[in-house]
Amino acid sequence: MAVAIDLVRPPLAYDDTGGEGPPLVLIHGVGLSRNMWAAQVPALAARFRVIAVDMPGHGQSPAPSAQAGLRTYADRVVAVLDYLGVDKAIIVGFSMGALVARAMALHHHDRVKALILLNGVFDRSPDVSAMILARVDDVLAEGPGANIDGAIERWFSPEFRRTNERYLSGLRKHFAGNDPKGYAIAYRLFATEDRYGEAQLATIDVPTLVATGEFDVGSTPAMTKALAARIPGAIWRIVPDARHMMPVEMPDATNALLLGFLTTVEQGGSFGDRG
């Protein structure tokens, strides 16, 4: 059941470009904030009203309750749409944000015009699930910055790490400054809910793009193809040479992918075959 939310003030922190274009919502990954979309917002804002939110317990948004689930996160994004008077939007989720976007499509299908799931997770193996849960334990013991160095190695190419030390230093500082409660709740959901709504995925009936990077070791191409196969009409794309943080490291390729798909949605055409 949806959680009742007071609409006197926004339930989540957000940025809104405004304008008359179709509304489009950006949902970031665990430990990040709406600032991760810095390269996407200007590319999208010429054609869309872009609304970038901070998930509960992230950025400037209040922490969720200890009992919060993905439905809670989805409800709060929908409450932002209610607050802004937006009936229906294109939903773009990255990593854990892709799980939240999936929950929106399953529980609030009438509010979703199209769905883009970037670098998401689906049906991890038992060994991988155990490894992710061990990282949750590290976070509970040591705080939000516990695993950031390992994450940076997985998320970015060696070349990016070598030439963007200032950005990565800021990222480490950001992670260490996350609300411990909100971060731990979100990370546990990310670790355990990769199969969220699996039995209902076939009910998603909006244009859907599922994409990841060629070298994304946590949100693998195999996951992307398997998830797309469960959603009727969904197509998948693998971005060559990209790792997990492709919206940051490879913004041009990511923006071209988003805009190419969104153009077909606007025109009611086909984005090509499923692969």
Image (cartoon, rainbow, N blue to C red):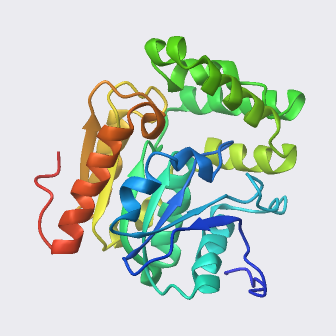
Query: 121 or 25: which is nearer to us?
Result: 25
Q: Residue furthest right?
A: 141
- How many marks are shown on the rendered structure? 0
Tell me the residue at 11%/54% (across/down): 272
In the picture shown, does residue 3 fall above or below 157?
A: below
Which residue is found at the position 29% from the left and 43% from the top? 225
Direction from residue 11 to residue 18 in the image, left or right: left
Residue name at image x 18 percent, y 65 percent: 264
Quadrant the N terminus occupies = bottom right
Residue in front for this viewpoint, 137 or 125? 137
- Looking at the image, can residue 134 be seen? no
In the picture shown, does residue 259 fall above or below 139? below
Judge by depth and name the residue closer to the eye, 32 or 187. Answer: 32
- Residue 175 x, y percent position in the rendering: 74, 35
Q: Quadrant of the C terminus?
A: top left
Res. 53 in view = yes
Residue 102: give x, y in percent of width and height. Answer: 48, 62
- Quadrant of the image occupied by residue 119: top left
Q: Is residue 219 left or right of residue 75?
A: left
Q: Which is nearer the eye, 107 or 42?
A: 42
Q: Position of residue 134 (x, y in %)?
A: 72, 27
Quadrant of the rendered image containing residue 220:
top left
Question: Is residue 273 shown above or below 6?
Answer: above
Q: Position of residue 179 (x, y in %)?
A: 84, 46
